[in-house]
Image (tube, rainbow, N blue to C red):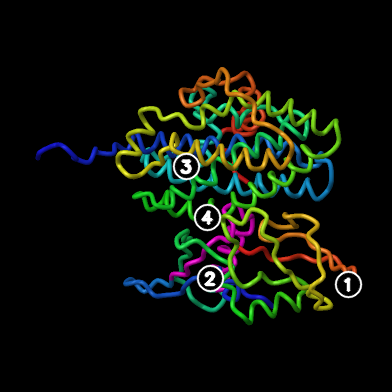
């Protein structure tokens, strides 16, 4: 072997970690959106947020089930979702940020959808058949999420003085969590080199273009990138995740193995 | 009645080498809550028809698309009061692409979207400007 373009062996552990973090992103964001159920500004929006949450939980389930299969230790989707501690969760920090007011929820979802849209489209070409299949479904779903949140960004940004101000505040608050979206750690690098993963750093230009196009129409501006908060992929979270998990995992912690 | 075959959810029914009947189904949306119920009902239907050795498999790829809804299925949806999806799938880049949705009640093309998301993940909420009736639109996917 000359060794110049030798394919790197993909260890199951790396693949497990890669799939698991994606699952964590979707579960935590879904749980956050679910908090709006019954409390959204209008009935239609209540349905919309719940539907987006449902898409996300569907994606999370497929990913957790696959992660469990890759790990090969007999853990199923429920065990991975309900029986891991905070530091074991590897979700992006932006997904666990509080709903705040409606502007914060919309900006958070808009930022993530504008990222997941190109992410899933590229993942459709993954050498991993299961990830490619999950991506093929998810990329169709996220198109709606991006469209829906884009419409809200424009309506709120170009709306009243108050809605505009709230959007400015939400953009300022959430901007510092966007740097993490494009990070490539050792796990992501290995997955990229083996043709399984996506080059997240390469999505930045497209993300910025999408976000800026919509913000411009909304008479808003993307805040200047300052300090970027990071750590989710290493299990270092904001204080919010513990609270989310205490609610999410309550039943399984109280009655381990409970089924219904 | 609209069947799961009309909707393209039932992908195939075949016998495997061991004589087991294998029904392949595919979810419409990742999070569709009816997925498990549909699988259960397929099993029950096969049992009731007298088949003992049966199995239901879920297939993700190729991803379900509304293009798989048969023309008969579209007509049945319309009769049921649900506007069938427009013929070509949702363009990924058409962020603000407006689709022309025809009212399933009066046939008017003068309709407006009330919400991108309806009573289930696969439907959007519309209103007819001609007959004023609200209706569900089966989203293009």
Helix, strand or loop for disc 1:
loop
Asked if marks 4 and 2 touch (Cβ < 8 Å), the reply is: no
Asked if marks 2 and 3 touch (Cβ < 8 Å), the reply is: no
- N-terminal label among 3 and 4: 3
Query: What is the distance, in whole Å, between disc 3 and disc 4 at their CAs?
Result: 21 Å
Q: Circle 3 sits on which residue?
A: A76
Q: Is residue A60 above or below residue A244?
A: below
- Report the magenta residues as a range: B22-45
Q: Circle 4 sits on which residue?
A: A137
Disc 3 is attached to a residue of which chain? A
Q: Are marks 4 and 2 on the same chain?
A: no
Q: Are marks 2 and 3 on the same chain?
A: no
Query: What is the distance, in whole Å, between disc 2 and disc 3 at their CAs?
Result: 26 Å
Q: Circle 1 sits on which residue?
A: B130
Q: Circle 2 sits on which residue?
A: B10
Q: Are marks 3 and 1 on the same chain?
A: no
Q: Is residue B91 above or below residue A151?
A: below
Disc 2 is attached to a residue of which chain? B
Q: Is residue B64 left or right of residue A220?
A: left
Query: What is the distance, in whole Å, between disc 4 and disc 2 at their CAs?
Result: 17 Å
């Amino acid at each position: 072997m000359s060794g110049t373009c030798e394919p790197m062996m993909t260890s199951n552990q790396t693949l497990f970690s890669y799939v698991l973090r994606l699952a964590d992103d979707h579960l935590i964001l879904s749980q956050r959106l679910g908090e709006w159920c019954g409390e959204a500004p209008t009935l239609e929006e209540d349905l919309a947020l719940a539907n987006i949450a449902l898409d996300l939980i569907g994606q999370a389930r497929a990913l957790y089930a696959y992660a469990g299969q890759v790990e090969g230790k007999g853990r199923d989707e429920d065990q991975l979702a309900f029986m891991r501690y905070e530091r074991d969760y590897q979700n992006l920090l932006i997904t666990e940020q509080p709903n705040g007011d409606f502007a914060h929820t919309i900006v958070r979802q808009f930022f993530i959808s504008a990222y997941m849209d190109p992410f899933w489209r590229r993942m459709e070409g993954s050498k991993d058949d299961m990830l490619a299949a999950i991506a093929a479904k998810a990329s169709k779903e996220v198109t709606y999420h991006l469209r829906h949140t884009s419409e809200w960004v424009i309506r709120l940004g170009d709306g009243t003085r108050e809605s505009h101000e709230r959007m400015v505040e939400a953009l300022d608050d959430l901007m510092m969590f966007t740097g993490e979206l494009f990070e490539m750690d050792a796990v992501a690098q290995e997955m990229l080199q083996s043709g399984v993963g996506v080059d997240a750093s390469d999505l930045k230009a497209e993300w910025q273009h999408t976000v800026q196009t919509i913000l411009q129409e909304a008479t808003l501006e993307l805040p200047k990138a300052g300090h970027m908060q990071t750590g989710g992929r290493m299990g270092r979270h904001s204080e919010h995740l513990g609270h989310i998990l205490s609610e999410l995992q309550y039943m399984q912690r109280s009655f381990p193995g409970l089924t219904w | 009645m609209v069947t799961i075959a009309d909707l393209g959810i039932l992908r195939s029914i075949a016998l495997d080498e061991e004589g087991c009947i294998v029904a392949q189904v595919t979810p419409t949306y990742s999070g569709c809550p009816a997925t498990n119920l549909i699988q259960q009902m397929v099993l029950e239907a096969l049992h009731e028809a007298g088949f003992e050795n049966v199995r239901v498999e879920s297939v993700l790829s190729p991803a379900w698309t509304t293009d798989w809804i048969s023309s008969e299925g579209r007509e049945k949806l319309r009769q049921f009061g649900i506007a069938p999806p427009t013929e070509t799938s949702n363009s990924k880049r058409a962020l603000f692409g407006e689709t022309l949705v025809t009212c399933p009640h009066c046939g008017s093309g003068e309709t407006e979207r009330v919400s991108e998301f309806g009573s289930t993940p696969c439907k959007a909420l519309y209103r007819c400007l001609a007959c004023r009736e609200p209706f569900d639109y089966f989203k293009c996917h």
